[in-house]
Image: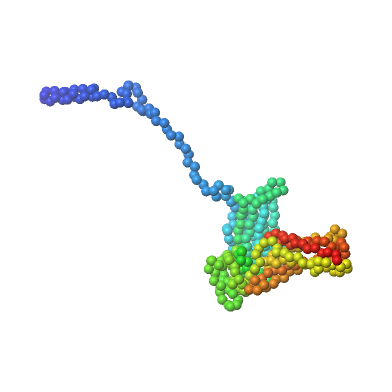
Amino acid sequence: MKVWLLLGLLLVHEALEDVAGQQPPKNKRPKEQGDNRIKPTNKKAKPKIPKIKDRDSADAAPKSQSIMMQAMDNGRFQKPAATMSLMAGQTVELRCKGSKVEWSYPTYLDTFKDSRLSVKQSERYGQLTLVNSTPADTGEFSCWGQLCSGYICRRDESRAGSTYIFFTEKGELFVPSPSYFDVVYLNPDRQAVVPCRVTVLSAKVTLHREFPAKEIPVNGTDIIYDMKRGFVYLQPHADHQGVVYCKAEAGDTSQISVKYQLLYVEVPSGPPSTTILASSNKVNGGDDISVLCTVLGEPDVEVEFRWIFPGQKDERPVTIQDTWRLINRGLGHTTRISQSVITIEDFETIDAGYYICTAQNLQGQTTVATTVEFS
């Protein structure tokens, strides 16, 4: 027993000598009594830079905010859906927030200055009310705020609202047309629309040629159907011309639209192509003289004429007559010929000089002139 005890004491003594003989590791100092147990550090912390989320350029622009609300039967208001179906005869009340609100609505209501429509502006909102609605009122109703600086205002694109309303009536699938026959001009440099719009969102609509009688395929490449516009010819050409009509089907009801005459237009868009011609450039005293100003243009583009003539300052009495007609120039090409003629009776010395005609359309104006001399 004593032997084992002596061996244990010897082992403990040797272990203590080994620990005492070890050197402290480099870069470390022996811990003194009372030292903090948390070791200090000399590492430099990198500053944290907050991450900025990337945004598209579109996000940087102000997002459009819908300002339109619809008055409900229970007296509450809610945002209208992009498209709505209402029974004809219902009253529609729309409000848009803002002290300066502008409205857009189907041209049918504006053309006939319909008393069923009223637009009012209060201090906080604009209000549009339509009573006794009919299928002809089907279309887009929209509003937008105005940004004004003094008397100059511009549209605020970030504050707007719109809804397309179908006014349905039993047996009436198409939006009524004011005439039984209409003309659609096919221009090679812009889309053409056969306005077969329906009053029932779920209606199936097809396009047909009268002669030879057949359905015209709508393939999404040459022709598409847009419920808000009708059949759209994306790239019109001469082969598309002729008489067409539309057919709508919804449930057990079917209806045929009015007929549309498609005419191909030869003259491209632009300022009027104008010529001027006098009946004679040398006139004897007492004779009558006429000067004709002629424009060849698109069938559906109106032209306005203005004249400047020698006796104008002296208030010389003249006769001015404007006319227009459609002409066929071969291969089915249709052109509008607009003319203005100024006539002077009993030619005098003050009537000699330059006769200047200015023709103007939506694309610009053209001025031409000719001289008439006293013989």
Point out residue 301 in the picture as x, y percentages from the top left corner.
69, 65
- Applied colour scheme: rainbow
Point out residue 53 in the picture as x, y percentages from the top left corner.
49, 44
Q: Quadrant of residue 191?
A: bottom right
- Is residue 273 or residue 260 the one in the foreground? 273
Residue 370 in the figure: left or right of residue 36? right
Point out residue 126 in the picture as x, y percentages from the top left corner.
67, 53
Q: Quadrant of residue 329?
A: bottom right
Residue 197 shows in the view: no
Residue 366 shows in the view: yes
- Is residue 297 or residue 9 the one in the foreground? 297
Residue extending furthest bottom? 212
- Is residue 140 or residue 115 the one in the foreground? 140
- In what quadrant of the picture does the C terminus appear? bottom right
Numbered circles on residues, count? 0
Residue 345 in the figure: left or right of residue 276? right
- Rendered residue at 23%/22% (across/down): 21
- Rendered residue at 38%/27% (across/down): 40
Point out residue 132 in the picture as x, y percentages from the top left corner.
67, 64
- In what quadrant of the picture does the N terminus appear? top left
- Is residue 19 or residue 290 the one in the foreground? 290
- Rendered residue at 80%/63% (across/down): 371
Residue extending furthest front? 375
- Rendered residue at 67%/52% (across/down): 101
Is the residue 97 above or below the residue 246 in the image?
Answer: above
